[in-house]
Amino acid sequence: MTQDTAAAVVMFSPAQRVRAIGVSEILRITDRANALKRAGRPVIVLGAGEPDFDTPLNIREAAVRAIGQGDTRYTVLDGSPAMKAAVQLKFRRDNALDFGLDEISVSAGAKQVIFNALMASLNPGDEVILPAPYWTSYADIVQICGGVPVPVACGEENGFRLTAAQLEAAITPRTRWLFLNSPSNPSGAAYSAAQLQPLCEVLLRHPQVWVLADDIYEHILYDGLAFATPVAVEPRLRERTLTVNGVSKAYAMTGWRVGYGAGPRALIAAMAVVQSQSTSCPSSISQAAAIEALTGSQDIVAERCADFQARRDFVVAALNRIPGLHCRVPEGAFYTFASCAGVLGKRTRDGALLQTDSDFCRYLLQEVEVAVVPGSVFGLAPYFRISYATSMAQLEEACSRIAAACEALT
Ligand SMILES: Cc1ncc(COP(=O)(O)O)c(C=O)c1O
């Protein structure tokens, strides 16, 4: 290469929209934990956002049949008619909601549904209200799509739920969406119909605000609580609500990449435009598997939920026995979101001062080799999230290590 051509090489520079988004702290923690594991350390990683059990056999068999039958071509771009019919059935059966096939969009995961919806609807500077703690990806997707995330801190005193007064105060003329995620990642908090009602009343007064209801953890809800979703609670919101769901969590199908949304035709059509120029359609084989998940036996869903509830009970009780930690009982999902306020201000054996939840999480990884995620990543500190989608044996070991680490602080 001559000097001239060498000088012509321009270093890669990421686009502005990507530059605003840092590498996720969750990935950083997971990378660090995995590096320790590779080095032979007995690290316990409680960061995963996916069920630890296998996709049920009937679902896997449906995919094998689809391959055998040559169901291997592009499908209709936002979901095959059979897949959309399965989603239609699911909404009728589980939520008493009736959607036409042209009010349904199927994508490669709920995440892509959310991405498509924001890509299709946000103009630069549009605001999206995110009750905090929130799933980190919400804020990143909003920013990629040119919007402005507006986090609203929802404290433990109201069970990590948004109040009507907070919602009213957060709405501006630029507000385009309110995100509601129940049960929530990371807090596990869920809204009952009675708790959604006052929020719906506020929304009725602000017709420019749309609602994105992320119901992905619908089937992981404990203590016999009844699941509630905004459109079912307030049908007048139907013309401006996108109800998002998927098969990842309920059927342990995170790798299959199928999610879906139901909402107003015009939005669904705009989302199809976005999808048509990105992935073209979800995988035909994964859609065949998802059809079986949604229309086949649902017994596994309740069985897994019972398993998760036993783990929740164990982890919450174990954390609440540790001086300095405090954990509210989550209503659903597979996460605990415990406060570590009581250990901040203390020192490690090396004399380091723990000032933030990130310090505490780093300390847990260094001292006792347990990887958990700080609340600040989800927009609310000082907390830490444990994913209890892992074996009881691992959870017992992890909780006793966390107890030992807290005891060692002075
Ligand atoms: C709140 C929430 N919504 C959506 C998703 C994405 O699910 P999917 O695998 O369907 O993209 C997740 C996954 O962690 C989640 O926690």
Image (cartoon, rainbow, N blue to C red):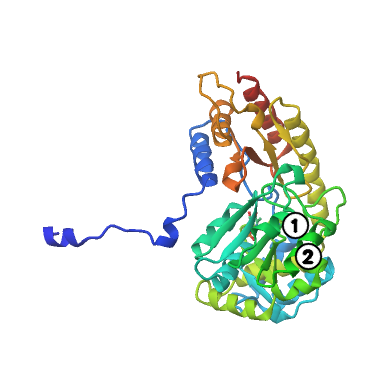
The picture quadrant for ligand 1 comes to: bottom right
Q: Is residue 385 above or below residue 127?
A: above
Residue positioned 37% across, 59% down in the render: 14
What amino acid does circle 2 point to? Glu
Position of 82 with respect to 222 (left or right) is: left
Mark 1 and 2 residues: CB-CB less than 8 Å, in contact?
A: yes
Mark toward the start of the polypeptide (1 vs 2): 1
Name, please, the residue furthest toward the right. Answer: 224
Q: Is residue 361 visible?
A: yes
Residue positioned 50% across, 72% down in the render: 278
Q: Which residue is mark 1?
A: 164
Residue 29 — which label?
none
Rendered location of residue 236, percent (x, y) = 78, 74
Q: Quadrant of residue 244?
A: bottom right
Rendered location of residue 351, percent (x, y) = 51, 19
**Element on which disc 2 rests:** helix
**Element on which disc 1 rests:** helix
Q: Mark 1 near ligand 1 (CB under 8 Å)?
A: no
Q: Quadrant of residue 70?
A: bottom right
Q: Quadrant of residue 247?
A: bottom right
Q: Which residue is mark 2?
A: 201
Residue positioned 76% across, 36% down in the render: 316
What amino acid does circle 1 point to? Ala
Depth order, front residue of 320/27: 320
